[in-house]
Amino acid sequence: MSGPEFSLEPARRLTTLGAMSSAAYLPILVQVTLAAAITGGVIAASHLFGQRFKKNAIKDSAYECGIRSEGSTHTRFSVKFYVTAMLFILFDIEVVFLIPWTFVYRDFLANNLAILAPMLFFLGVLVLGLFYEVRKGALEWEK
């Protein structure tokens, strides 16, 4: 056979990735079960062995540097604080989708699969959302 060599190895890798058996998910199941057991054990241990005390007005009061608190100890926050926090979480989650993409980018290129266009579309939607937020003034504190 003359010319460049042809290999079926990438095609085999694609079929083996698509045909995962339920045994491949066993480590995830073990990890989730172990995490739930440890969480339940810690909560049960703190409930069983934790200190029990009677309610006391002095011990239940807010304490700041040895000075009694004046006024309400539960102040209200502006809605802008919550909006900013939600926007931070929204754009922080984008990184969760971008990091795995960077790890599989070369594999997708080796298998001649288009991955750049969908990720650019995803980033474009995020940038449009950011422009929308700026235009609506969601990031302005002095309004």
Image (tube, rainbow, N blue to C red):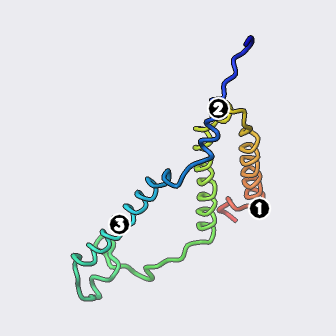
Amino acid type indicated by mark 1: Lys
> Is label 1 or label 3 in front?
3
Classify residue 90 by image quadrant.
bottom right
- Label 2: few (<14), some or many (≥20) within 10 Å? some
Q: Residue 89, located in which quarter of the rendered image?
A: bottom right
Query: Residue at label 1?
Result: 136
| x and y percentages locating residue 38 in the rendered image | 33, 64
What label sits on residue 10 in the rendered view?
A: 2
Q: Residue furthest top?
A: 2
Q: Tag 3: residue type?
A: Ala
Picture residue at 22% right of the left edge, 78% below the top: 51
Q: Is residue 64 left or right of residue 24?
A: left
Residue at 46% x, 79% y: name it.
74
Q: Which residue is mark 3?
A: 37
> The N terminus lies in which quarter of the figure?
top right
Query: Of 138 and 88, which appears nearest the observer?
Result: 88
Of tags 2 and 3, which is closer to the observer?
2
87 vs 103, nearest the viewer: 103
Dot placed on the residue nearer the N-terminal end, 1 or 2: 2
- The amino acid pointed to by label 2 is Pro
